[in-house]
Amino acid sequence: MTDLYQSQRAMRQMRRQAMQRGVIAILDVGSSKIACLILRFDGTARLSEDNSIGSLAGQSGFRVVGAATTRSRGVQFGEITAMQETERAIRTALQAAQKMAEIRVDHVIACFSGANPRSYGLDATVELEGQVVTESEIARVLAACEVPEYGTGREVLHAQPVNFALDNRSGLIDPRGQLGHNLAVDMHMLTVDAAAIQHLVHCIKRCDLELAGIASSGYVSGISALVEDEQELGAACIDMGGGSTSISIFMKKHMIYADCVRMGGDHITGDISMGLGVPMANAERIKTFCGGVHATGADDRDMIDIGGDTGDWEHDRRTVSRAELIGIMRPRVEEILEEVRLRLDAAGFDHLPSQQIVLTGGSSQIMGLDGLASRILGQQVRLGRPLRVHGLPQSATGPGFAGAVGLALFAAHPQDEWWDFEVPVDRYPARSLRRAVKWFRDNW
Amino acid sequence: MQPVGGVTRPHPHARAHARPDPAPSRLKYRMQRWLLTPGIRLGLRVGVPFCLCFALGSAFMADPQRRDALTLFMSDLRASIQERPEFMVGLMAIDGAGRNLSEDIREAVALDFPVSSFDLDLEQIRQRIIELDPVETAAVRIRPGGILQVDVTERQPAVVWRSRSGLSMLDETGAHVDNLVSRTARPELPLIAGQGADRAVAEALRLIGAARPLADRLRGLVRVGERRWDVVLDRGQRILLPPDKPVRALERVLALNEVRDLLERDVTVVDMRLRARPTVRMTGAAVEDWWKIRRINGYGQ
């Protein structure tokens, strides 16, 4: 646990340095595209004079000065499978963004979606030493959490205190300074495969960049795609990406569950490619321009050129009706949504007071998806787009950029995590003693 | 049959569709990042052009011949601008000075008209004019139309000073105005004499003003020992005045004269140097007479 503290704290330190320098890069490593935003921080976000939240929800502390996307290579299911290719893709995106921003960035915050995220709920109760809850008491109760056996080869990505309870009062966001006897905490911990993180770290290091933070893609797209009351009342954000579909459930402005379905838009494209016998590029084009999930009578007469480049005139001028295309796409979309439904049921989403579901991500742009999703997931489904942030180019405001924009918000306003609190002193008695001796020797 | 290790031509279609890899090479990527570093950017934007200009300039200037040519060109250019008719000054107009003084000023300024107004140092010209004795103030400016306008106020002579070097006229501040050939040339000016008299002209003028009742008898004032004045009247009479408050002393003498006709009598010197003890020196004949009268009256010892 201590080296988890150390690596995460090193990243926090890096992030603080980047904030001081005022420039940080956001890297969304997806399966179908790699998006890079460059943020410039110019002062802390201020509320307006009447203390109300302004039109940008207090997010005016930074602006996007550079944005670039590139086709992702070497990433499957949100995990890096070919490091060289991914590194080249990251380099392409970063170079273009740097060129647009005309600034050099050294710090990057990255997010990725795959790597089998698994959620754990931790809790702990301690008796307060004094009457008042202090920062060190919070650290103590956090340290008292029983860490489950999440297995070797796994790494903790997020560990956020979600809820504090003081004696019989629960639902406290910030108990510091309050009086009581027993302090309890509920914590949400998200673990992912360590190898995926290692690969990402390696790729970023090969691009001469310092990693200032890693986030789960489901979490950050939830931050940007869910509006404030949805985050407060409880909602699920489903980020349908290229290679994987991330699920995150928010409640009281905290993520309480995250999961991932290893299917996404690329699989739909693959189905079209296989079903029609066309290259992936053609299948992608057909999917984006003509795709849909609800067939009507007119779609039988709507013929689509599917093309091809074999050189065989007959073969390259085949057509299919739109109904056929929908017939290929719909089962796969249904399969993804059914899988999401299963995961949500497993998480106990139907016990939450609010059943709001927000679909975002590039694949959520399939025509008629909201109708299909409301039949599978429940009535309260809407399509979400990321929050507007300063300086974001129009081309990067679509639902496919929910992760990148959310990561920008996350960079500007990170949530308190486990490692942001000091480790209680009794955790390292030997080291502190050694430190005291060293201080004594240095000063006397 | 293909040669072993020979290059296989790619399929034409494949080549047409293979898009070039957009990824920059590592070197290119590093290069771009290096060029985006703020220090390097500044260096490239400011430092390199500066160094380049400096190097080119030094290379050009290294040859003395080119340097001379450049200075010649610059001076030619300068002269061609300065000698435009708009900037030329053709003549000098002097206001407020008599003919003699005007000629003196022209002589002192000694300009060769026409001259460019860039070459005129007006302040220097003004200094040179002010240095002339008869000039009290002077203003020099260039009037439109190429005229050097000199406005002069002449000094007005107030007294004639007779010194060892001759007669000269002084104004009320004691400044030298002009030499005088003979006293009769300016009979209306009062006369002062003695060493250091020019430094006390103001006091002398006050004394002369106070001595107006004696104006027809006043010959002049003499500065004695550079500290006090003698008033010299005709018939060899003198009034010796103290160094401080001489006007008061003179007024006392005048009052005495009014009442007792002091100066009408046979007196050579009225000595007012000791304020508490005014003294009168009589002529020898008057003393003889006085003794005789005393003897007759039987007042003597």
Image (spheres, rainbow, N blue to C red):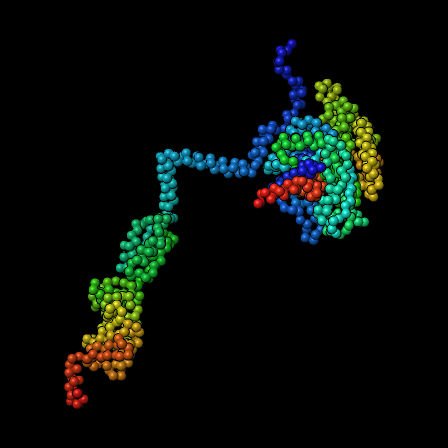
Quadrant assignment, res A399: top right
Q: Quadrant of the C terminus of chain B?
A: bottom left
Residue A81 visible from this viewpoint: yes
User: In the image, A197: left or right of B43?
Assistant: right
Q: How many numbered marks have been drawn onto this rendered protein structure? A: 0
Which residue is rendered at x = 34% and y = 56% of the image?
B126
Quadrant assignment, res A20: top right
Task: Measuring from the top left, give residue B265's x and y in whole percent.
Answer: 20, 81
User: In the image, B167: left or right of A80?
Assistant: left
Q: Nearer the viewer, residue A167 or B134?
A: A167
Q: Quadrant of the N terminus of chain B?
A: top right
User: In the image, A408: left or right of B49?
Assistant: right
Which residue is rendered at x = 71% and y = 21% of the image?
A309
Quadrant assignment, res B8: top right
Task: Measuring from the top left, give residue A257's x and y in whole percent.
Answer: 78, 38
Which residue is rendered at x = 83% and y = 36% of the image?
A345
Residue B119 against residue B194 in the figure, above or below: above
Task: Measuring from the top left, give residue A110's x and y in whole percent.
Answer: 68, 35
Q: Nearer the viewer, residue A415 or A138?
A: A138
Residue A48 against residue B135 in the figure, above or below: above
Which residue is rendered at x = 70% and y = 41% of the image?
A427
Residue A67 visible from this viewpoint: no
Task: Measuring from the top left, give residue A217's x and y in whole percent.
Answer: 72, 36
* Residue sticking out furthest to the top: B1
